[in-house]
Image (cartoon, helix red, strand yellow):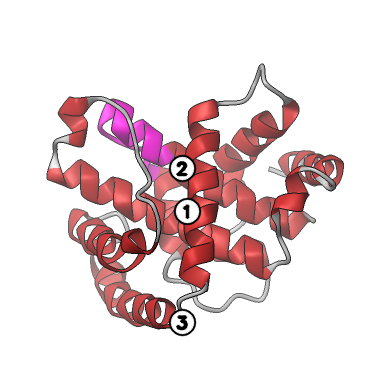
């Protein structure tokens, strides 16, 4: 269950960065970089190594803990976007052609990221275009609401899409680890316990 908690924490960390960009025009540098870097990790011996280590998911683990605790600490906007991402991931997972195309393109962008840095504007623009071209058309568009001034800026839109791509990547990982919607109902207690255990180690 800890591995699933890591994947969900990564998903929520990416979604939280999406909302920060929509509201404030910029994300938190390190949490965003952790999410974006995960897109270029194709093999890892442990789940947390996809994100470097669990310390780099501190923001996501905190958000996951809050989301699991109840209405008073839950952010409904984050919940809505996260559930939409999980729905989009299912459509993506059912489309082998899209999965193959995304994987191939990520391998190309990885070269650019290794040269310029994962959060370089050109890298984020390339990732944003990949999301718009290959993933967004697969299901209902994920509606992100925020400050219209920022959401009218092409660079912010590209960064939001790049973060959504990282969120989908985390959702794919969660599903590969055996995650399902039942985690939020039948296994909620175990998931909460795993999250708190991970938080105690960061």
**Mark 1, residue position:** 167
Instruction: Find the distance from the CA under tag 1 to the CA under tag 3.
Output: 19 Å
Q: Which of 107 and 29 is in front in this view?
A: 107
Query: Residue 197 lies in what quarter of the image?
Result: top right
Q: Nearer the viewer, residue 152 or 139?
A: 139
The reply to whether dot 1 and dot 2 touch (C-beta < 8 Å) is: yes
Where does the image place residue 117, in percent across and percent down from the top left?
Answer: 29, 61
> For mark 2, does the 10 Å Cα neighbourhood hold few (<14), some (14 to 19), or many (20 or more) residues?
many
Where does the image place residue 113, in percent across and percent down from the top left?
Answer: 29, 67
Of badges 1 and 3, the one in the foreground is 3
Q: What stretch is highlighted in magenta?
A: 17-29
Of badges 3 and 2, the one in the foreground is 3
The reply to whether dot 1 and dot 3 touch (C-beta < 8 Å) is: no
Q: Secondary structure under badge 2?
A: helix
- Picture residue at 28% right of the left edge, 79% below the top: 108
Query: Residue 17 lies in what quarter of the image?
Result: top left
**Mark 3, residue position:** 96
Above or below for 110 versus 193: below
Above or below for 119 versus 107: above
- Picture residue at 72% right of the left edge, 59% below the top: 3
The reply to whether dot 3 and dot 2 touch (C-beta < 8 Å) is: no
Q: Which of 100 and 18 is in front in this view?
A: 100
**Which SS type dominates the magenta stretch?**
helix
Residue 27, magenta (yes or no): yes
Residue 82, magenta (yes or no): no
- Picture residue at 52% right of the left edge, 44% below the top: 82
């Amino acid at each position: 269950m800890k591995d699933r908690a890591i994947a969900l924490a990564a998903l929520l960390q990416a979604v939280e960065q999406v909302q920060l960009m929509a509201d404030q025009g910029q994300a938190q540098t390190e949490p965003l970089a952790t999410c974006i870097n995960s897109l270029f990790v194709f093999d890892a011996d442990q789940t947390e190594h996809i994100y470097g280590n669990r310390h780099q998911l501190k923001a996501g683990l905190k958000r996951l803990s809050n989301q699991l605790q109840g209405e008073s600490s839950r952010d409904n906007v984050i919940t809505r976007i996260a559930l939409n991402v999980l729905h989009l991931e299912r459509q993506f997972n059912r489309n082998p052609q899209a999965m193959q195309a995304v994987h191939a393109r990520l391998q190309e962008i990885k070269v650019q990221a290794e040269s310029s840095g994962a959060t370089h504007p050109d890298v984020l623009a390339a990732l944003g275009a990949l999301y718009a071209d290959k993933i967004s058309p697969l299901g209902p568009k994920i509606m992100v609401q925020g400050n219209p001034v920022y959401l009218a800026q092409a660079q912010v839109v590209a960064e939001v899409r790049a973060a959504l791509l990282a969120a989908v990547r985390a959702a794919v990982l969660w599903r590969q680890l055996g995650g399902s919607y039942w985690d939020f109902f039948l296994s909620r207690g175990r998931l909460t316990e795993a999250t708190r255990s991970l938080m105690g180690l960061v």
